[in-house]
Image (cartoon, rainbow, N blue to C red):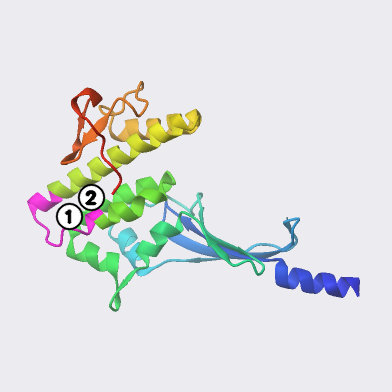
Amino acid sequence: MILLVGFFVIRSQGHVVGSEFAPSHFQTRSFSFYEIPLLHLQITPIKRTVSSNPTSMYLRQNNLIRVGKGAPQQWHLMSLSRGLTGTTDANANLLVDQLTMQSGSDSYWRKWSIDHPSHAKILWPTVQKLAQRELYVLLPALLERAGADHEETSESVARLQQTIDGYCKEQYTRLISDMNDAGRTELADELLKEASQDFPEEFPEEFDGSNLTFERDDPDRAIPPAASSQSRESS
């Protein structure tokens, strides 16, 4: 009787299912296994199934992202469900939701990339880089800004690059400052290192998030705090 009860408990409460995203290949995979409830002790092998979507396949086929050799080594959690507790989304799902977004019968960002090839060459490497750094929270707003230009011209291409750079600088500034204020100096240092790789002039080693602000009407222009009365607010 005890064994029978235990079987039904594990069957109903111990089933774990989830999904993950590989930023190196823009692939997703689902996984499932059984565990002992509450103790979270895995008792069956993990079953995994790799999949992709039309947008990701288009980006890979047209070299709009840099795909690593071999199988993906880095997987970020998209969602997780244990038993009857319901599904909890993780940060990587913020990007995958965009990649799978539909526009009529076509994938929105696939069609956008076909219609805006020069814009796509600027946008997607940045999206991939931020995803590899697990900065998924920055991506919905970045993609929204990228989709604002409906016509592709030389001026709009330059404008998109300026918009992306300005947005990334602004967000790194805020994140570094917030992490330092929260006492999470190791994470602040890691963010500073990443920002310095992309924008070495704006993010020197002594940067702490308080010595750089951005003008509201020109988010790409860095100015010292003494020359600006207020920093840019989040959109």
Instruction: Please provide the residue range marked out in magenta.
Output: 145-157
Residue depicted at 88% across the width and 71% down the height: 3
Q: Residue lying farthest top?
A: 206
> For residue 122, which numbered disc appears in the image?
2
Residue depicted at 23% across the width and 62% down the height: 113
Q: Nearer the viewer, residue 57 or 164?
A: 164
Residue 207 in picture, x, y percent from top left = 34, 24
Circle 1 crowding by C-alpha within 10 Å: few under 14, some 14–19, many from 20: some
Q: Which of 29 and 101 is in front in this view?
A: 101
Q: What residue type is labelled 2?
A: Ile
Residue contact at pointers 2 and 1, CB within 8 angstroms: yes
Q: Does the magenta stretch include residue 43?
A: no
> For residue 25, which numbered disc appears in the image?
none
Residue depicted at 50% across the width and 49% down the height: 74
Residue 217 in picture, x, y percent from top left = 15, 41
The quarter of the picture where residue 193 lies is top left
Image quadrant holding the N terminus, namely bottom right
Element on which disc 2 rests: helix
Circle 2 crowding by C-alpha within 10 Å: few under 14, some 14–19, many from 20: some
Res. 26 visible in picture? no
Mark 1 lies on residue: 118
Q: Which amino acid does label 1 sit on?
A: Ser
The quarter of the picture where residue 145 lies is bottom left
Q: Does the magenta stretch include residue 149?
A: yes
Residue 234 is left or right of residue 216, and the answer is right
Q: In this view, does 154 lie above or below 232?
A: below
Residue 235 in picture, x, y percent from top left = 28, 49
Residue depicted at 42% across the width and 51% down the height: 24
Element on which disc 1 rests: helix
